[in-house]
Image (tube, coloured by chain):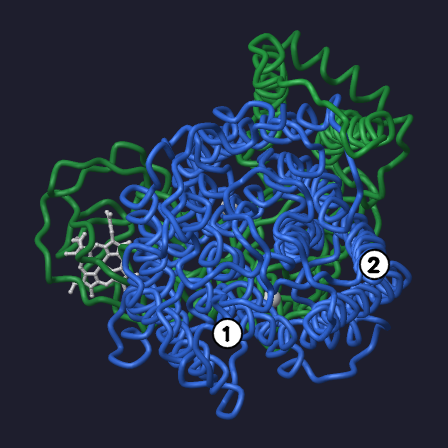
Chain colours: A green, B blue
Amino acid sequence: MNWFLALMNTVAVNTASAAGKSFMPPVGTEIASDVDNLYSFLLWTSFLGCVILIGGMIFFAVKYKRRTDNDKTPYISHNMALEFLWSFIPLVLFLVVFAWGWKVYHDMRVMPENAFEIHVQAKQWQWDFMYKSGKVSTNDFFVPVGIPVKLVMASEDVLHSFYIPSMRIKQDVVPGRYTTLWFKADKTGDYQIFCTEYCGAAHSAMLAKMHVVPAPDFEKWLQENEEGLTLAQKGEKLYNSKGCIACHSTDGSVKVGPSWKGLWGSTGHTMANGKSVTVDENYIRESILNPNADIVKGFSAGLMPAQQGLLTEDQLTALIEYIKTLK
Amino acid sequence: MGNTHASGDNYINHEKGLWSWLTTIDHKRIGLMYMIVILFFFLCGGIAAMLIRLELFASGPLFDGNTYNQILTYHGAIMVFMVIVPGIPAILGNFFLPIHIGAKDVAFPKLNLASWYVFMAGAILAISTLFTTKIDTGWTFYTPYSIKTGTAVVTMVMAAFIMGMSSILTGLNFIVTVHKLRAPGMTMGRIPLFVWAVYSTAILQVLATPVLGITLLLLAMERTLGVGIFDPARGGDPVLFQHFFWFYSHPAVYIMILPAMGIVSEIIAAFSRKTIFGYTAIAYSSLGIAAVSFFVWGHHMFVSGQSEIAGIVFSFLTMLVGVPTAIKMFNWLATMYRGSISFESPMLFAMGFLFLFAIGGVTGIMLATVGLDVHFHDTYFVVAHFHYVMVGGTLMALTGGLYYWFPKMFGKMFNEFWARISFVLIFIGFNVTFFPQFVLGAMGMPRRYADYVPAYESLNKISSIGAWTIGVGFLVALYVIIEGLMSKRIAPANPWGAKTLEWQVQSPPTHHNFEVEPVVTAGPYEYR
Ligand SMILES: [Cu+2]
Ligand SMILES: [Cu+2]
C-alpha cells in the first residue's frame, strides 16, 4: 500500500506543479497538500477522460458527417473486447482514487493524541470559542502554529458546519451531540472560517477569522484580560451548585451514583446490559442529559435526574472539562 | 399505416373542447397536459434562478437574507419536484412509451388521468405557500431548521408528498404497461432504449418515493404533534432525517437522469442512422444503476457526523455506480462511429448532453472521493456538478426530445434555424454560468450564501451573465415551440428517417395509435 501511495504522490506532485494551484485556497497544513495532490491527479485524469469522450464525439461528428441521404451504415451491435476495456479501465481508475481518498480521509479523521483542545459552540449566527483557561472569544480566535488543534463542537439550535478552506477540512456541527475535527496549522497568518450548512437568514454572515500565531504570542493572548475561572473550575462550581455532589464523589468512593474519578477515557466501561463503552464526550453528554439511555453496571435506572433542558451547552462543556481533570 | 393525412382524424381533433381534454384518458393528451403545466413551472423555477443570479451578480445585499433563502428554496423545490423529476416520464414517457411498444394506451388509462390530477393538487398546494408564509428551508428540508422555522413547511412537505403519490402511480402504470401490453413480437430485447430507461425509472419511482413520503410525513407530524423524531430538543436525531431523505433523493437523481439517457439513445441512433451499439449493455446498465443507486445515499453525508467507516463504504459504492454510467457514454460514442450523422437541432442537444454530462460525470467522481469531498462538500463545486448533470443532462435531453418528437406530437415542423439558435444560447450560456462555479467551489465559496466575500465577485459576475444567456435561450426555445404550433409546415410521418414504431404511424397519431395491431419482427434500430 505504501509504495503505491508514494508512486501516486510523485505522479501528483509533478502534475500539481504543472497545474499550478488549480484555484484551491492557499495551503495551510500538510493534509491540504495531500488533498491538492489527489485533486490534481483527478483533474488530469478527468481532463483526459473528457478529451477522449468529447474529442471522440467531435471527431466522429466531423468524420462521419452524412454525405448523401442514402448512406449505408454498418451493423455493429457489440464488441466484447472493447466493452470489457471501457468498463474495466474506468473501474480500476475509480478504485485507485477511492483508495487514495480513503487514505486522506483517514488522516483527517484520526484525532492525534495530546492535541490542544478548543470547544466551539455554534448558534444562529455566531461562533463561540471556549478555551480550557476559561477564555471565551466570539467569531475570532487564536491557535498556536505547528501544534495539532482539536475542536470539539456543539450547536445550540440548528445544523451548522465548520469549514476552514485552507486546511481543506469541514465538519457539520450537530445539535444534541459533539462532533470533532482537527488540524495542524503550519503557517502563521489569518484564515477564513465559513459556515457551510444552511442555517437561516444570516447563514452567509456566519463567518469567523482564525489567527495562527507563534506559541508565545498565543500564550500571551490566552492570558490576556483573564479574570474568571478556567473551564474546569466552572465545572467544579456546577458540580456543587447543580447537586451532582449528592450522588457522585470525585475520590473514588461510591455514593448513590458511580464516582467520577478515573471515569474520563476509561475503555472497558461496562453497562448494566453487558455492553461496554469508551467514555468520551458524547458518552458523558448522553449520561448527563439522558441517563436512562445507558445504565452503568451495578446501579439502577431512574435514580439520576435527567438534565435535558436544565443545563446550557456552556455548562455541559464545563462539567465535562471538570470530569476530565479527575484522573 | 404510414400515410400522412393531416386533415384526417387524429388524437388532437378526435374530440373537441376543454372538457374533452380535462376528462381524457388518452395517454397522448395526458402527456400534453403535463407538458403545458410543467413548462409553466419551469418558467416559475427559471424566474427564481434569474433572481438568484441577480442577487449574486455583485457582493453586497440586494434582497434581505430571508427573501433570498425563499427564492433559493422555491428554485430548488420547483425545479426538482415539479419539473425535472416528473418532466421526461410524464410528458414524453406518457406520449411515447405505449406507442413504442405497439400498444393503444397505458395499462390503466384512468389511473393515468388520476395521476395528473394528483400531481396538479400537489403542485397547487406547493404554489399556495407563496401566498402564505412561504418557505425557506432549501429543497432538502433539513432538520432541525425545518422544525424551527416559522415558514409553511407542513404545507410544502404535504405538497411534495402528494406529488410523490402521483409519481408512484405513474411508475406503476408504466411497469405494468411494459410487461403486459407489448405488441406481438415486441420482446423485451426489442423495446426501444427509451422504454428501458423509463421502465428502470419507474421501478425507482415505485420503490424509493414511499420512503420520501414517510420521511416528510414524520417531519409534518413532528411539527404539528411534537413527536420527537428528528429534533434533538425532543430527543430526536437530526442526522437520521438526512439518512431518510437521501435514501430517496439519491435514487431520485437517477429518476431524473435515466429517462434523459433514454432520449439520448434514441436521438443518437436516429441521427447517425445506425444501430445502437451495445443495446443490451445500455439496457442492463440502466437496471444496474437503478439497483446500486439505493446503496450510495451516504455520499451526501461525508461530513454530517456519520462514522468514518460509513463514509468509506459509501465512497466505494458510489465509485461502482460510475462504471455503468461510463459504459453508456462509450456506447453512444461507438454508435456514432461510422454512422451517417446529420446535425438537426435534436442531435445538437444530444451532443450537448454528451459534452456536459461528461463533465458532470467526472466531477461526480471527484465528489465521491471521500477525502476530497470534505473540501468540496456544500460549496459551489457541488452546485456546479449537479447543474451539469440536471440541467446539462436532463434539461438538454428534454429540450432535444421535445424537438425530436415535436413533428410527431403536433404534426407540424418547427423552425430549424431558431431551434439551433436556442441550442447555441443554452449551451454557451450554460458553460459560462456553471464552469466558473467549479472554480468558485474549489476556492471555497459555500453554497446557499446570499452574499460572499469580495474575492469571489468577478467569477460570480461571469456566472450571472451566463445565466441570463440561458434564460434567453430557453425563451427562444419556447418561441420555437409556439411558432411551430401556429405554422402551416405539415410534418411527414417520419421526418428523421427513424426506425422505432412511433415514426411508422401518421403525424400526429390517431386516437388509437395503430389502426391495426402492429406485428414486430425486428429490433428498434435496424438501419442496415
Ligand atoms: Cu450556516
Ligand atoms: Cu447522491
The answer to the question of whether label 2 and label 1 lie on touching residues, with beta carbons closer than 8 A, is no
x 42%, y 82%: residue: B125
Residue B481: image x %, image y %? 70, 68
Q: Quadrant of residue A84?
A: top right
x 35%, y 41%: residue: B183
Image mark for residue B429:
2
Callout 2: SS: helix
Residue labelled with disc 1: B13
Image mark for residue A297:
none
Residue B492: image x %, image y %? 66, 54
Residue B171: image x %, image y %? 35, 54
Ligand 1 falls in quadrant: bottom right
Callout 1: SS: loop
- Is residue B168 in view? yes
Q: Chain of mark 2?
A: B
Task: Indicate which disc, 2 or 1, sits on the residue closer to the N terminus.
Answer: 1
